[in-house]
Image (cartoon, helix red, strand yellow):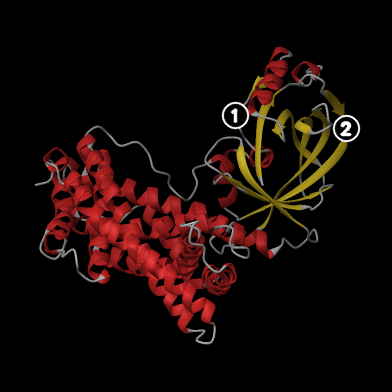
Amino acid sequence: MVEEEQKYEVDDTFVLPDLSAAAPVGGRVRALPPVTLVARYLDTVDLRLARAGASLRHRAGDEPPWTVKLPTGTPGVRHEISRPGPAGQPPPELVELVTALHRGTPLAPVTVVRTVRHAHEVCAEDGTVLAEVVDDRVSVLDDAGTSTDEFREVEVERKAGDRDLLGRVGAVLRDAGARAGSFTPKHVRALGAVAQAEPDLVAPGELADDPSAGEVVTEAVRKEVRRLLAHDPLVRLHRSTGDGDSAVHQMRVACRRLRSDLRTFRPLVRRSWARPLRDELRWLAGVLGGARDAEVLRGRLRRTATADPLSPLDAGAVDRLDDALAQRQRRALVAIDEALRSPRYLALVDALVLAARAPRLTRRAAAPAARTLPKLVARPWRRLTGPDGVDGLDPLAPDDRWHAVRKQGKQARYAVTAVLPAVGSDARRLARALARVQDVLGEHQDAAVAAETWLALAAERPDDHEIAVTAGRLAERERDTVRRMRARFPDAWHRATRRRRTRWLP
């Protein structure tokens, strides 16, 4: 689930005001009995979780007692996942969810926080809890259970209500003397300045007005490493159900973009550093690809089967085809599970964190980006436009030839996107046009693969005549899509190659 809350700083003289003015018409505010919660937080010795905005805790009084909280990139909004388990042993599933943060380093208790909580629920007329307001008196405990620090804070957590309700509650609290505070979790306040230091994973930042080529490379690497590792826990969380396909897709895209950037910027990065990183990213993208491809095919199956309501297909045969794809997807998810638990993946995560901190650059990277990067982008652009690319593309060429152009187009688009911070609007126009080209070529490839898949699945069941007929009709519809995309391609390509979009390329 996603937790959204606001924090307010208050002193010992603060009195929680009547919150009924913030409740909706017909609603009410319900006071809950006070409770005492004792939370033990686990982290690495150097507080990697806390510095990254995450936490793993056991809190007596909660059910279930073990909770992981993960940042979403928005202050006050976090993913919250809770599981049962004994006090002394965190559930392995939760430890795995923060793998990208601890990177195999042991987790141990780092602080204990006791909270005396007075909670109030803001309810709708039907009793639905819209928001919870808690007045917390917090004590930081040492190993002997003695308080070493104390503070007080008020939190407002959104439940079934909207953000406007949070705003109304906040206004009532501020009128009573509460001060809107920065979003600092209790355990981070308890651990002090060390827990608020920079995280190991360096985030992308703002480039100077006239950046060097190396600075642009560094930001491109940081952006994709951040995307990859941010989706790691979401892939783990949903891998058993297949509900995390968007996270799998984003993680796979990050692998591909990062590999592409390292290739585009090859003269600017040390080969001995970049080559092994690209190899490992290829491995991970391949593992993720099986589940993603199966998910795409399952969605496509249903769309293609219902594309012509006047000519319906055998529903039972479609279901059996979907079952075969579902089995393929489950096997692929098991492969992801094994890969993300492997020492090989841990080593890759370590390498990615180091890459984001300080990519290994060559001397050429010190040159101005505006002068250096267009020349590098011109290389994949020439491959795309040349005789082995679009110029030599026959409308009747095999699907593989069109797929090769699609891959060249993707490489060129990634390269253009990577230099946007240095080139600006000219590159942005070309990137948008190439995205439309990729939409056409991507649909072409998806249809071609789907047609082959339907026929291959039918061949695996030679005695199922309904599947044979259904697969044949599905394949015909997919081949019609292939023909339509080939007809649409010239116009998309013409728009992309207009001089005003490509004039910045040497």
Residue 446 x/y as whole percent? 37, 63
> Mark 2 is on which residue type?
Leu
User: Dot 1: within a 10 Å radius of its alpha carbon, few (fewer than 14), some, or many (20 or more) residues?
Assistant: few
The residue positioned 54% from the left and 46% from the top of the image is: 52
The residue positioned 53% from the left and 67% from the top of the image is: 340
Would you say 8 lies left or right of 311 here? right
Q: From this view, report whether residue 345 is shown above or below residue 257.
A: below
Residue 310 visible, this angle: yes
Would you say 75 lies left or right of 87 here? left
Residue 154 x/y as whole percent? 73, 28
Judging by the rendered image, the residue that carries numbered circle 2 is 32
The residue positioned 27% from the left and 39% from the top of the image is: 421
Of labels 2 and 1, the one closer to you: 2
Would you say 162 lies left or right of 86 here? left
Judging by the rendered image, the residue that carries numbered circle 1 is 182
The image quadrant that residue 127 belongs to is top right
Looking at this view, is 142 or 94 the one in front? 94
SS of the residue at dot 2? loop
> Mark 1 is on which residue type?
Ser
SS of the residue at dot 1? loop
Looking at this view, is 261 or 306 the one in front? 306
The image quadrant that residue 94 belongs to is bottom right
Residue 418 visible, this angle: no
Numbered label tally: 2
**Which label's residue is closer to the chain start, 2 or 1?**
2
User: Dot 2: within a 10 Å radius of its alpha carbon, few (fewer than 14), some, or many (20 or more) residues?
Assistant: few
